[in-house]
Every structure is written in structure tokens, then in C-alpha cells.
Image (cartoon, rainbow, N blue to C red):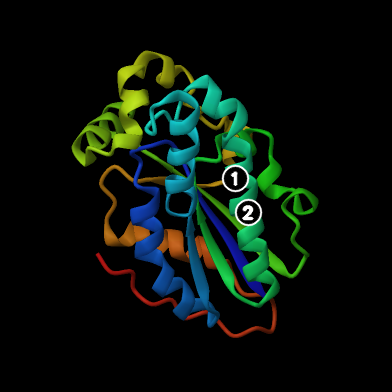
Amino acid sequence: MTHLVFFCGHAGTGKTTLAKRLIRPLAQATGVAFCLLDKDTLYGGYSAAAIGALTGDPNDRDSPLFLQHLRDPEYRGLIDTACENLEQGISALVIGPLTREIRDRRLFDRAWLGVTNNVQIRVVWVYTSEETAHQRILARNNPNDAYKLAHWDEYRQRRFVPNADLSKELLMFDNTAPQRADYDALLARIVGAPSAGEPDVILPPVPV
């Protein structure tokens, strides 16, 4: 069995840092190879060039023009890349906000994703307070954040929060100040309990 694990959440919540922390322990726990697919790494340069040609501002990553015309193709390419790896027996950690897709429950729709029943799907929702996220975004000083920082009141209105029903389908992770036990618990939830007759999965400690 291969694994498709999404690390989703708003900017500044620490999605990429968390995924990088867990990828080796996940590979050890499951015995399969994982690839790391970060939307910003895969499409950041291309999207900057494209939106720069259209608007003159390569850092315009949250404007209506970007969201209407470039956002969805980025995500579709991200998921299709994950599927190609899964077809080759390589599990995938996929990193991106993916808020629309979570809200519409698309990340649980195997037909929409293009994956078979032999793929285990987990969706981690990484969150922290708006204030903490804002401070982290300021501290990292990434040009891609320029639009959202300049239009913070507009951006914060788009900050989707999963409701109680949807939260039951997600692996909710508070990334404000997690401890080793929190990482270990998340790792166990991603891997899941063994089926009857299968040996117990021995989980390696997650580095802190």
C-alpha cells in the first residue's frame, strides 16, 4: 500500500516544516519511500514569471487575477505529480493550503484525485492562531507574501476554518508550540492502526 498525505493550512502555520520533520519517520514506520511535493517549490518560480508578465508584479500571488486563473492549475499539477509517483509505488507528502479542496471534500474523493483504493489518504490540517501566523509571515520576509500582508484584512476574511463535521475527517494539528509527544501522536494517526493479523507498526521517534 502507498500513502498520500496532505499537509494543508494557511500561510504561516508551518506546513512545510512539519512535513519535512515527519517524512523520514513516516518512511521508517511504513517501509515505503516518500517524495515531498511542495506547491511553492514546484510552481513558485513559474507562477512568479506568469503573474509578473500579466501584472508587472511577480509577487502578486493572492490577487483576484491569480486566484481566478493560476491557482487551480497549480493545484491540479501538484496532485497529478503525486499520482504519478503513487503509480510507481512511491508515497507522497503534498504541501499546500488546499483550502477550497478541503472545504469541498475533494481531497477525500478518489475519483477526483485519480487514486485507487490501494492508496491510503490522510489529510493533516495544520493550524495556529492568526496572530502567530501573521508574526511568522513577517519574520520569514518572503516576497510572495507581499500581497497578503498589504491586504491583510482582505486576506484574513478568506482564512477558512474547518467546521466540526469536517474536522472529524481531518487530522487536526496545532502547530503553535508542539512537543515531541504531539509529533509522535500525529505520526501514529497518519500511519493508522494495523489491520487484524498484521504486525504492530513500530514507530520511530520524531526528531525535535
Q: Which residue is mark 2?
A: 79
| Depth order, front residue of 200/53 | 53
Q: Three-letter amino acid code at disc 2?
A: Ile
Q: Which residue is mark 1?
A: 75
Q: Position of residue 2 (x, y in %)?
A: 64, 72
Q: Is residue 172 visible?
A: no
Q: Three-letter amino acid code at disc 1?
A: Tyr
From this viewpoint, which residue is outermost toward the right? 111
Do the residues under discs 2 and 1 have CB atoms within 8 angstroms?
yes
From this viewpoint, which residue is outermost toward the top? 153
Mark 2 lies on a secondary structure that is helix
Give the quadrant of residue 120.
Answer: bottom right
Classify mark 2: residues with Cα within 10 Å, few (<14), some (14-19) or many (20+). Answer: many
Give the quadrant of residue 70.
Answer: top right
Q: Position of residue 133 (x, y in %)?
A: 30, 34
Q: Quadrant of the N terminus?
A: bottom right
| Depth order, front residue of 65/15 | 65
Q: Position of residue 3 (x, y in %)?
A: 61, 67
Looking at the image, residue 160 lies above or below residue 112: above
Is 1 on the left or on the right of 164, as rendered? right
Q: Quadrant of the C terminus?
A: bottom left
Give the quadrant of residue 147.
Answer: top left
Residue at the (42%, 21%) spot, across then down: 155
Residue at the (28%, 69%) spot, across then down: 207
Q: Position of residue 113 (x, y in %)?
A: 72, 52
Residue at the (43%, 32%) spot, across then down: 52
Looking at the image, residue 35 lies above or below residue 29: above
